[in-house]
Amino acid sequence: MARRLLTLLAALVCVLALGQTPAGAASFANPVKPVKGADPWISYHDGNYYLISTSWTDVITVRRSATLAGLATAPSVQVWKGDAASRCCNIWAPELHHVNGRWYLYYTAGQNVTD
């Protein structure tokens, strides 16, 4: 019984996989921030959306807009710049949180290495 169930499950997985398109066949352009817009984080506070994303530099910028669509043309304002060689050029996955009346910026950083 268990073997028959596993066989049916394997067949189902194969059938579902056949219906998938190859990863290279589809493309996507970020409509909000097409350039250096990986790892987006959006917060909403007091009527505005705040967008922060990976730039792969030593600078973190934030965009603010009353609408999500407006983030595409909102100016990027620098809110932080790296000050240590150990994290000079490799900042990614920033997050912006508003907690108890204060803003907190969280990010990941690494050294300027080829890997």
Image: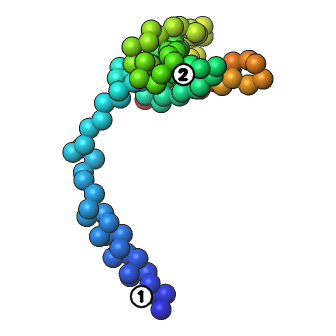
Rendered position, 79 above or below 99: above
Rendered position, 1 above or below 113: below
Residue under numbered circle 2: 49
Asked which colour scheme the image uses, the reply is rainbow
Dot 1 and dot 2 residues touching (CB under 8 Å): no
Evaluate whether residue 107 shows in this view.
no
Quadrant assignment, res 81: top right
Classify 10 Å Cα crowding around label 1: few (below 14), some (14-19), many (20 and above): few
Rendered position, 24 above or below 71: below
Classify 10 Å Cα crowding around label 2: few (below 14), some (14-19), many (20 and above): some
| Disc 2 element | strand
Q: Give the farthest residue toward the bottom.
A: 1
Left or right of 87, for residue 103: right
Q: Residue at x 73, y 25 (%)?
A: 99
| Disc 1 element | helix
Q: Distance between the residues labelled 1 and 2?
A: 52 Å
User: Identity of the amino acid at label 2?
Assistant: Tyr
Q: Nearer the viewer, residue 72 or 93?
A: 72
Q: Which residue is drawn at 53% across and 28% down?
A: 41
Left or right of 43, for residue 73: left
User: Identity of the amino acid at label 1?
Assistant: Arg
Q: Where is residue 109 in the image (x, y as percent from the top left)?
A: 56, 23
Evaluate whether residue 12 shows in this view.
yes
Q: Give the farthest residue toward the right.
A: 100
Disc nearest the viewer among 1 and 2? 2
Left or right of 82, for residue 99: right
Q: Residue at x 58, y 9 (%)?
A: 79
Q: Residue at x 44, y 19 (%)?
A: 71
Residue under numbered circle 1: 4
Q: Position of residue 86 (x, y in %)?
A: 58, 16
Of labels 1 and 2, earlier in sequence is: 1
